[in-house]
Image: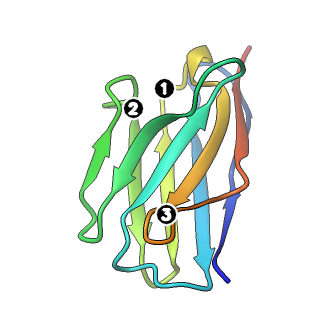
Amino acid sequence: QVQLVESGGGLVQPGGSLRLSCTASGGTFSISSMGWYRQAPGKERELVATIVRDGSGSYAESVKGRFTISRDNAKKTVYLQMNSLKAEDTAVYYCYWSLYDYWGQGTQVTVSS
């Protein structure tokens, strides 16, 4: 069975950085696009970034220039490097495995002084 395990969330001050990791198991990773989404309290889940099999990424306008998505197919892991974090980036961040329409359990990111 497929599984995604996210890590790397936490509390960070505005302007700080975090790197989220999402490790996949139980399925085919290298050919699948992967995504990071987030959901803030009282808001709908929204797309943050996606990466296709060749490593090309696309981003929501709100995070362009601050976040970078990458992948390591050998490790079956997708990353989200988040720099210059803002309070409005506070949310639960979810990893998405498009080949299986499968979501990770989420990791909390809180940006606060």
What crowding class fits label 2: few (fewer than 14 Cα within 10 Å), some (14-19), or many (20 or more)? few
Indicate the secondary structure of the residue bearing disc 2. Answer: loop
Amino acid carrying mark 3 in the image: Val
N-terminal of the two: label 1 or label 2? 2
Q: Are the residues flagged by discs 1 and 3 in contact, CB closer than 8 Å?
A: no
Residue 95 is situated, as x and y percent measured from the top left of the image, at 57, 54
Residue 66 - label:
2
Residue at the image position 31 percent from the left and 31 percent from the top:
65
From the image, state whether disc 1 or disc 3 is nearer to you.
3
Residue 58 vs residue 90: left or right? left
Based on the displayed image, in which of its 4 quarters is residue 16 positioned? top right
Above or below 55: residue 106: above
Residue 68 is situated, as x and y percent measured from the top left of the image, at 38, 46
Q: Are the residues flagged by discs 3 and 2 in contact, CB closer than 8 Å?
A: no
Residue 78 - label:
3
Amino acid carrying mark 1 in the image: Ser
Residue at the image position 39 percent from the left and 59 percent from the top:
70
Quadrant in the picture for the C terminus: top right
Amino acid carrying mark 2 in the image: Arg
N-terminal of the two: label 1 or label 3? 3
Above or below 97: residue 37: above
N-terminal of the two: label 3 or label 2? 2
Cα distance between the residues tagged 3 and 2? 17 Å
Q: Are the residues flagged by discs 1 and 2 in contact, CB closer than 8 Å?
A: yes
Cα distance between the residues tagged 1 and 2? 6 Å
Residue 84 - label:
1
Indicate the secondary structure of the residue bearing disc 1. Answer: loop
Residue 8 vs residue 88: left or right? right
